[in-house]
Image (cartoon, grey):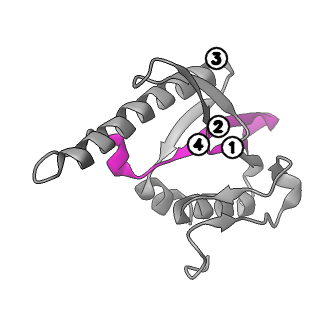
Amino acid sequence: MNSKLPPIGLYHPINKEKYLGDHTPNFRSSWERRVMWFLDNNDNIVKWGSELVTVPYMSPLDGKIHRYFVDFYVEIAGQNGERKRILIEVKPKKQLNPPKTEHRSKKTVMTETKQYVVNNAKFKAANAYATANGMLFYVFTEDDIQMHCN
């Protein structure tokens, strides 16, 4: 994959028959772009879509229900003609752990803490949604993408 591509933009699927959705997918990071390329070009991926699944979740910040658009919906060819259905979210690994507080401003720590607790609420809701609908839910970090999406 060309590393000189922009970190945000539109991804134009090569294998259009595999792409689900009525819009050209938009990537918001080079990691999302890399996952899109992998899903589009991997023979084991039967179908994929970007932000097709919306999961309601309660924000711990305001106690209100919000909508979470999971990054990817994927169908993988399994044994005996079965298809595995998977939801994938792409996040930097630093957002999966509580923020470090040492030598950091209170504002930065507060912003990252809010992001961390909201992400956890989203992930919990997405996992429950996936389980209830016979799917799996994964959060891919840069490490997972490096390992699996080449």
Quarter of the image with the C terminus in it: bottom right
- Image vertical order of residue 61 relative to residue 71, above or below: above
Which residue is labeled 3 in the image? Answer: 132
Using residue 113 as the reference point, say whether residue 9 is left or right of it. right
Disc 3 from disc 4: Cα separation:
16 Å
On the image, the x and y values in percent for residue 109 come to: 23, 44
* Residue type, numbered disc 2: Ile
- Residues rendered magenta in the picture: 70-97
Q: Nearer the viewer, mark 1 or mark 4?
A: 1
* Residue type, numbered disc 3: Ala
Which residue is labeled 2 in the image? Answer: 86
Disc 1 from disc 3: Cα separation:
19 Å
Query: Which quadrant of the structure image shows residue 136?
Result: top right
Residue 39 can be seen in this image: no
On the image, the x and y values in percent for residue 115 come to: 38, 39
- Image vertical order of residue 130 relative to residue 43, above or below: above
Q: Closer to the N terminus: mark 1 or mark 3?
A: 1
Residue 75 lies within the magenta run: yes
Q: Residue at x 36, y 31 (%)?
A: 117
Using residue 43 as the reference point, say whether residue 70 is left or right of it. left
Q: Residue at x 55, y 43 (%)?
A: 89
